[in-house]
Image (tube, helix red, strand yellow):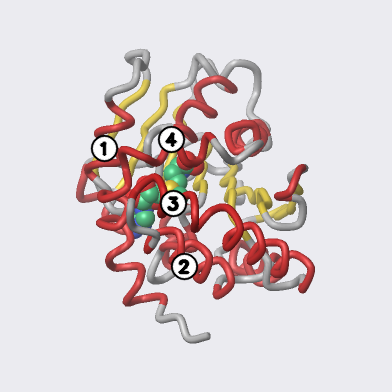
Amino acid sequence: MTFDRVREAAVVPSAFDQDASSYDRLVGANPGYFDHLKRSAARLGLPGRGAGLRLLDVGCGTGLSTAALLETYPEAEIVAVDASAEMLAQARAKTWPASVRFVHSRAEELGAHGVDGPFDGVLAAYLLRNLPDVDAGVGDLRDLLAPGAPLAVHEYSVADSPAARAVWTAVCWAIVIPLGWRVTGDASLYRYLWRSVLAFDGVARLQGRLRAAGLEAVRVEPMDGWQRGIVHTLVGLRPM
Ligand SMILES: C[S@@+](CC[C@H](N)C(=O)[O-])C[C@H]1O[C@@H](n2cnc3c(N)ncnc32)[C@H](O)[C@@H]1O
């Protein structure tokens, strides 16, 4: 299977634009989706309720990962960024405290849109796989972290396990792609999801990218449910 990451990634946000109004309904049918985001938020390992902390949710989509951060650290200031105007419109239409701010920007252009560090924690949920240059993306996020602060990458990664690849393909073709087609009338985003995950890093390679970017104490933590071995949290710290 050939998969041109750079060509596909350039148009991913516009694909999300088209399906934004159905996104929450579709992921709501995925058991564990929100709980797993909350688990990754908690795995940032920040103290207490987040009072005085500044957090970044990059690739926030309709705000589900933002809500996971907010529930976990209700007293933090949260900046949530996405490149899809329609996904952001869905996010902004929800009720948020004044401590949450949404910004329309590609992850590669945060500085140009007024999103500057340092952040006390960054969550990138289902984003990295969509970037044309994953290493540059990890480097950019590292640069936004305060010394000692964590980056949590929440991502599908199946390349290291034939069993995980088989389960992923079965779930996509039995449920995700038919459901996407039924709800939106066009399954292209969901076929992209299937192919982009198969073409993406295994856990070892992804962990290596975080280490190569200079992050320390990089660890990988699992999910439960059908996502066991398929969705992972990788956490690494910017050196002090
Ligand atoms: C699968 S959604 C995940 C949304 C949210 N984090 C969640 O967990 O529900 C991926 C999001 O990444 C955004 N995205 C893709 N490429 C991006 C980029 N280069 N910069 C910023 N956002 C991007 C898409 O627009 C989409 O909203």
Assign a secondary structure to mark 1.
Answer: strand
The residue beneath circle 3 is 180
Quarter of the rendering containing residue 208: bottom right
Does 92 sit above or below residue 135? above
Badge 1 residue CB within 8 Å of ligand 1: no
Q: CA distance from mark 2 to mark 4?
A: 26 Å
Q: Is residue 236 left or right of residue 121?
A: right
Q: Nearer the viewer, residue 24 or 108?
A: 24
Q: For the residues carrying marks 1 and 4, which lies nearer the camera in this image? A: 4
The residue beneath circle 1 is 103
The residue beneath circle 4 is 24
Q: Is residue 145 left or right of residue 115?
A: right
Q: For the residues carrying marks 3 and 4, which lies nearer the camera in this image? A: 3
Q: For the residues carrying marks 3 and 1, which lies nearer the camera in this image? A: 3
Q: CA distance from mark 1 to mark 4?
A: 19 Å
Q: Name the amino acid, label 4.
A: Asp
> Tag 1 or tag 2, which sits nearer the N-term?
1
> Tag 3 or tag 2, which sits nearer the N-term?
2
Q: Nearer the viewer, residue 217 or 6?
A: 6
Q: CA distance from mark 2 to mark 1?
A: 21 Å
Q: Name the amino acid, label 3.
A: Gly
Assign a secondary structure to mark 4.
Answer: helix
The residue beneath circle 2 is 134
Q: CA distance from mark 3 to mark 4?
A: 12 Å
Q: CA distance from mark 2 to mark 3?
A: 26 Å
Q: Answer few, some or many: residues within 10 Å of disc 3's Cα (few below 14, many 20 plus, some between 14 and 19).
A: many
